[in-house]
Amino acid sequence: MFNLNNKNATPLYQQLFLQIRDQIVSGELPAHFKLPSIRDMAMELAISRNTVEAAFQELFAEGYIYSKSRSGYFVSYIDQELASSSRTDHPQQDLHPKLVERYQYDFHPARLDPEVFPASLWRKCLIDSLRSSTGDFSQYSEPQGEWGLRCNLQFYLERSRGVHCSPTQILICSGLQHGLEIVAQLIKGRHESVAVENPGYHLPRDVFRNHGFDVIPVDVGAGGLNLKTLRSTSSTVAYITPSHQMPLGHVMPVANRLELISWSKTGNKLIIEDDYDSELRYIGRPISSLQGLYSEGNIIYQGTFSKVFSPALRLSYMVLPHALLNDYHRLFQNHFCQVPVIIQRAMINFMERGHWEQHIRRSRNFYKKKHEIMLQAIDEYFGRKANVIGLGAGLHIVLELTEGLSDELKFVERAKQKGVRLLPFSQFYISGAFENNKLLLGFGGMGINEIPKGIETLATLIH
Amino acid sequence: MFNLNNKNATPLYQQLFLQIRDQIVSGELPAHFKLPSIRDMAMELAISRNTVEAAFQELFAEGYIYSKSRSGYFVSYIDQELASSSRTDHPQQDLHPKLVERYQYDFHPARLDPEVFPASLWRKCLIDSLRSSTGDFSQYSEPQGEWGLRCNLQFYLERSRGVHCSPTQILICSGLQHGLEIVAQLIKGRHESVAVENPGYHLPRDVFRNHGFDVIPVDVGAGGLNLKTLRSTSSTVAYITPSHQMPLGHVMPVANRLELISWSKTGNKLIIEDDYDSELRYIGRPISSLQGLYSEGNIIYQGTFSKVFSPALRLSYMVLPHALLNDYHRLFQNHFCQVPVIIQRAMINFMERGHWEQHIRRSRNFYKKKHEIMLQAIDEYFGRKANVIGLGAGLHIVLELTEGLSDELKFVERAKQKGVRLLPFSQFYISGAFENNKLLLGFGGMGINEIPKGIETLATLIH
């Protein structure tokens, strides 16, 4: 039976979830066993139906139970031997990677607010796309992605980001990673190393390393990538986030952009511009893209629906320079587009009906408020003990502490004990270098009321 | 205005489609111009509404026009300059790859029948997945794919294909190509060349070549891959389709499978088993997978939803051997799953509600009938002039002509003139070698009434 405790810090539904889960993993509840109804269980345990339902939904979402319409929930089949062995060998993670703790204050930067997701509009667009695509389920689709989506993107990118291209240069991808995989294959043989921002996003480093490239760190200053350092390296490719440097948040000024472009003009150079969240700018006007400054040049432009719309959708795009199109066609002519047609068509509907621009405006206002609350809370609880860098855009800021931490990882662990999730800043460094005075604080997924409390908790931990 | 001719071989709707398209591309119909209503246009041109609607749907599907609910169709924005310049440089194809001819008899093997697609069940599952996943649109999902989908696949593969694995070994991918990209990165450095069936599927060759592997052709006999040839090569990796050799259709007998497994046991060998359409077997019992014969060995098992369900969904899976799991986690730990969560959840619903098994049974019966009609038609129109090889399974057969063609490509071109689409068999050969007596005939997407007529047309062309 279950042992639920109202006074426990863990919410009731989670206690119930954990206990049922353990019984499933241990085999106490066998595969295909029918769980009691929500109503019966609520009565028996003298808790609310909502609590039971929340636990069941969690079990369902994580695959421990499955549902049959009109007959309730059943225990999923789970390999007991493996489940128990992997528990001892690699506790939890190996069996089921989603079994991570829930945090009270989650400052992870890759989270959006479910409230801002336009669920009903999107559902409508998807259902319409399903209705109009039935015949298309039986065949492969266009390798570069749906023409209609590329036309819409071309139009959008031109107006909002100053990107100048034709739909024939656009590739629909399933995320930055997928786009970079294609780039890596395209440029292999002609380039040997890729310069990346340090600190910077880990994913491009991983992808290029996996493809055998040398990854060369270049330091970042207030003007973005340090161009002097870049020139001193032998690298002929630069991967950058000029509109909102990840993670420091700097915007590369136009002068530097022009200098970077002039670098790219000597020799066989290539710039990969990752414009991942430029839609979210709260202060000042957005700077147009690098690509737009020199659209005839060797610049690959990457954009995504993950940051401002949904990371679960796996939808992104890439604009290839004309110079790479022939190679792209040669290497990938027989490949298929990796994004489901119905998702692409749903996005065409979404954009053509004007929902996309509306969603961006709405998201910008929504996250702008969180951003303000974040800055206020930091001012209140940290005062002079910290500066904020990289503010004014995106879904995270960086807190620079005037007094350093003695051990970053220990601090992250201590924060965890208090229900605060932090991504260690040192993970952004190519060497994993120890960083003792910076905290990356994502606010996208935090509730408006959670932000001040989270910052307060953090401040208490530091002082 | 439009110039439609009833006596023209091109259907009326297509004439209308082409003429409107040209006016859009030339700019004669400007962006955001409202098209007349279907009713008005039908009256004006004295044709049926269905014809106008078909033309509009085609224009819509290809992105030339967009719709606003309750106000009709409008011309999409298209870059005129580019549209016209690319027209002269690379006629059609470069502007919009989908502008390919429609064939009366399309024997391309990668086509399914829209009729067998369970549109309403799938829509229901997808809508339910949307409803239950709203909160999950705001975060990234499990890198290996949804746990629930992996559990369902594990269960299904065990029962239907004898694959023995745990859900922790399963990766959800967006098609064979994506799965092979991961494999290529996993085995890079430890393997230098990959042996492939010749004739065989082009995609694995492309992927491994793009990743810098040598691709070594191995001939194929009635027992599948020639194991003697394989042993004579230096290759340590073999990519094979043992349950239904692509394209010849041979099934590798168990004795050969065991011999292949024994090959894999010496040295650091790896087998990649592509089990792409084993669900569709019409004669005899399916042979269980290679993986199931030696599940503790170095066998990567690849399966897909593209052949028996929908190629437009971009959903496939791969079972990694235990020996590769650590490397997989090391290389891809920070990567994201490329398949949208809602698609995965919809498939969980579809499988858990029993629709998947039902769909397989239905598809098998459905295509079995087409397969029979195909064989009858060949018997009737070719008689002794051709043998069928690789029959009894899948969505295509191979016709072996007793008297060879003088020029395959010219014949394919002649067939095209008669409205018959053929994929040149020589494309399956690694060298593109000329093949003069084999025709690959896909029947998945052909209507039951079209098959005999298509075969008759083909027979007329040959004799």
Image (cartoon, coloured by chain):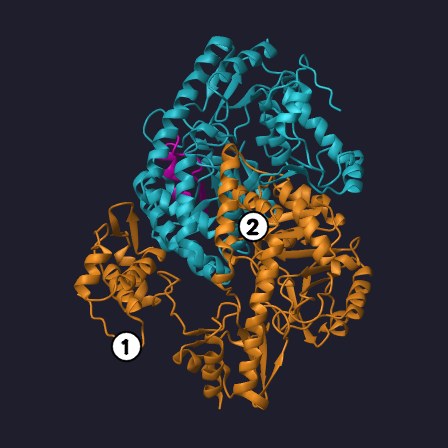
Chain colours: A orange, B cyan
Residue bearing the label numbered 1: A8
Image x and y of residue A341, in percent: 54, 42
- In front here: A163 or A94? A163
Q: Give the amino acid type for the residue marked by disc 1 in the picture.
A: Asn
Q: Residue at x 69, y 49 (%)?
A: A154
Work out how far the residue at label 1 is from the one at label 2, CA to CA, in angstroms. Answer: 57 Å
Q: Nearer the viewer, residue B60 or B270?
A: B60
Secondary structure beneath dot 2 equals loop
For label 2, count other residues whose C-alpha is less than 10 Å away and answer few (under 14), some (14-19) or many (20+). Answer: some
What amino acid is at disc 2? Glu
**Tag shown at residue B192:** 2
Q: Are marks 1 and 2 on the same chain?
A: no
Contact, mark 1 vs mark 2 (Cβ under 8 Å): no
The relative height of residue B382 versus residue B322 in the rendered view (above or below) is above
**Does residue A338 appear in the picture of this structure?**
no
Residue sitting at x 48%, y 54%: A119
Report the front residue among B165 and A175.
A175
Percent x, y of residue B328: 47, 58
Q: Is residue A19 visible?
A: yes
Left or right? Give the position of B86 relative to A412: right
Give the magenta-colored segment's residue range.
B253-281
Q: Is residue B270 magenta?
A: yes
